[in-house]
Amino acid sequence: MVAILDTTLREGEQTPYVNFTLAEKIEIARLLDNIGVEMIEAGDPSVSASIATAVEKIARLGLKAEIVAHSMAHKKGIEKAHTCGANRVAIFYATSKIHLDTKLHKSQDEAIAIICEHIAYARSLGLKVRYTPEDATRTDFDFLVRVCNAAIESGADRISFADTLGIMQPHTMYDRVRALKEQLLPCKIDLHCHNDYGLALANAMAGIRAGADCIHTTVNGLGERTGIPDLAETVVAFHNLEGVQHYNIQPLMQTANYLEKVSGFFLAPNKPITGQNAFTHKSGVHTNGVLKDSRTYEPFDPALLGRERKIVIDKYTGKSAVAARLDEYGIEVSGAELEVIVLRIKNLGDQRKQLFDTDIIEIAEQVTGREIDVIPHDINALVMIEVESHTYTPAVVRRLRSFKDVSNVYEVTGEYDISTFVNVENVMALNNLIEELRSVPGVKRTETRVILKKYTANGNGGNYGNAG
Ligand code: HCA
Ligand code: CU
């Protein structure tokens, strides 16, 4: 049985350039609690006054999850964890030679004495204690066992096996956790796996197989450098591959989207589970398979996450995908017409980076010679943006280019500084996108112009919408 500790509020806020407001933190804690994570690491109260306030507010929300405060091995921090009302303090103190020698300037025995003293102090305040040997995976193994057992004897009931630099592999993680299980006094083992080689979740799963109890996650995989396992990937991987059923999957997308909004870190389209392309199919062979039976190219039904499958229409498209798209609009065409439509779509796709439903409808109109009176499901719009006077416009442009629905960004003259071309599925998505654009630092105001009809320019199908 796996447990999850989510540390979006602590490790996640250590993501370069990410800071949450108090209200955002409370909302994040509620979302996490709704998903059902067993522990929420709410922050290290001695880092700043606002973090202490946030930990305190979250600890008093009455959530189901255990609320954990992080702290270095110093009494003030532990005391703050206590006054904030946290259930548990996670005390971290590095154990690897490089950290002891160059950062802490302590011998191994001195380290053990400091760690034990602070754990005992936390216990005397009535706090539960997790001890984290920071950089555990680069720590001499015999010393690691010695320090962890001393920590357990002093009152820690959880040890976080921290792969602080993300250097483990699934098989090394498996072996190490097995050895730890054999040599440690009774305790729960947490796995804190950094993702420097993209192996974090795989390593964590291997560690659980070997007998560890808990995985640390963040929403969208936030964290120092390249972060730690993503909560949604972890929950869904355990649900589908390991039969772990006790988490609530439906709020995962909403939570991921909320974190995109408040962190300003946007998901790569190819991100597993929550990325835009996770259930999008493109080549003729794949779409043909999926339309016949989605199990051909989908590892699981996107409905699990409340998501829908998508089929891209462009030069790779085959007949079945085009037929299905026309069918969605109730456009009837003959077999011969369909062949010509597909051919034209391929031609246009050769010239353009992206095709929209408007293009497909237009081609169908031309080929059939009939006027087709349907409104495209997807919406194209121009969003004009004014940038704050003290803000460097290219910095805003760089941000905007990372939005998945923004396909063109222009710096322009006139009343507005930037013009963007956006393509979204519906009005609600347009509203959400505009709200996200407005929350980009440096954006002062926006004005949106929905495109009602697009005209072909010089026979090349127009050039807006070409990503570039
Ligand atoms: C850090 C500390 C930590 C602690 C992990 C934990 C790590 O270096 O910022 O307490 O479980 O990665 O070692 O995040
Ligand atoms: Cu970490």
Image (cartoon, rainbow, N blue to C red):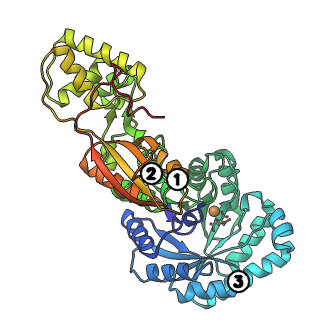
What residue does disc 1 label? 393
Marks 3/2: CA distance?
50 Å
Q: Which mark is residue 417?
A: 2
Q: Can you give x and y, in whole percent of width and height, for residue 22 in the image?
A: 45, 76
In this view, the residue in front, 191 or 441, is 441
**Residue 274 can be seen, yes or no:** no
Q: Earlier in the sequence, mark 3 or mark 1?
A: 3
- Is disc 3 in contact with disc 1, using a CB cutoff of under 8 Å? no
Q: Which residue matches tag 3?
A: 74
Horizontal and vertical percent for residue 333?
16, 17
Q: Residue at x 62, y 51 (%)?
A: 195
Say which label, 3 or 2, has the lower sequence index: 3
Question: Three-letter amino acid code at disc 3?
Answer: His
Mark 1 touching mark 2, by CB under 8 A?
yes
Q: Quadrant of ligand 2?
A: bottom right
Quarter occupied by residue 179: bottom right
**SS at mark 1?**
helix
What is the secondary structure assignment of the residue under circle 2?
loop
Tell me which corner region of the image, top left, top right, bottom left or bottom right, holds residue 114: bottom right
Q: Does residue 462 appear to the left or right of 14 in the view shown? A: left
Tell which tag, 3 or 1, sits nearer the viewer: 1
User: Which kind of residue does numbered mark 2 sit on?
Assistant: Asp
Q: Amino acid at mark 1?
A: Thr
Q: Position of residue 52 (x, y in %)?
A: 54, 82
Name the one closer to the observer, 224 or 418: 418
